[in-house]
Image: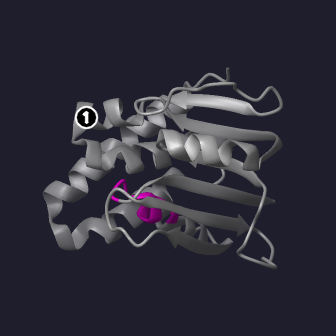
Amino acid sequence: MIEEVLFAGFGGQGILLAGQLVAKSAMDDSLYATWFPSYGPEMRGGTANCQVVYSDDEIGSPIVSQFDTAIVMNQPSYEKFQPTVKPGGTLLVNTSLVQIEDPREDVEIVRIQANDLARSVATDRSANVVIVGAYNAFRGLIKAATIRNVLQETFARKGQEVVDANLKAFAVGVEAGATLQVK
């Protein structure tokens, strides 16, 4: 098994953190994992993306040009990265911020209103954690308990309130991901 994933959006949406959560969780689940970030010079508002590759075997390169799954959190990322999904792959789209235009027929397009769901339990800032939950529930390649542990470790220094908000965001994402429809 090998999974090649792209996370893409604006700087400030937690794109790099979402990728780190998946990569660290994969490692904690005894998988090999790489995380390769790419971002513009702007801290917030610029583009950000990262590539995560995880596998039950050694990984030859962290750089990928075609992905099994692309997770796009904003319109520019949708437009730029939808062509990079392998035929038969999955495009997971944050429809709170993305209008799907000219959808590809050779990929699964999965829609989730990540920002809206995040707002229902915390704030927009946790949309990245919602999308991680939805992705993992939909793909089912990493144990949810492992990701919850990584979330607790990652946010512990920010206090229990932040940990709890992110665990709620993850749970909402998992619930949504379990019922996502491919369209």
The quadrant of the rendering that contains the C terminus is: top right
Provide residue 133's location: percent of width, then percent of height: 47, 45
Dot 1: element: helix
Q: What kind of secondary structure does the magenta stretch mostly adopt?
A: helix
Give the residue at x 72% y 72%: 63
Residue 122 horizontal side relative to residue 53, left or right = left
Give the residue at x 53% y 61%: 49
Give the residue at x 36% y 68%: 42
Task: Provide the residue designation for mark 1.
Answer: 119
Provide residue 120's location: percent of width, then percent of height: 25, 30
* Amino acid type assigned to the residue bearing label 1 in the image: Arg
Residue 136 makes an appearance in the image: no
Placement of 46 over or under 104, stated as above or below: below
> Relative to the observer, which residue lies in front, 137 or 59?
59
Placement of 62 over or under 148, stated as above or below: below
Q: Quadrant of residue 36?
A: bottom right
Start-end of magenta stretch: 12-19
Residue 5 in magenta stretch: no
Residue 13 makes an appearance in the image: yes
Its colouring scheme is one colour
Residue 41 horizontal side relative to residue 82, left or right = left
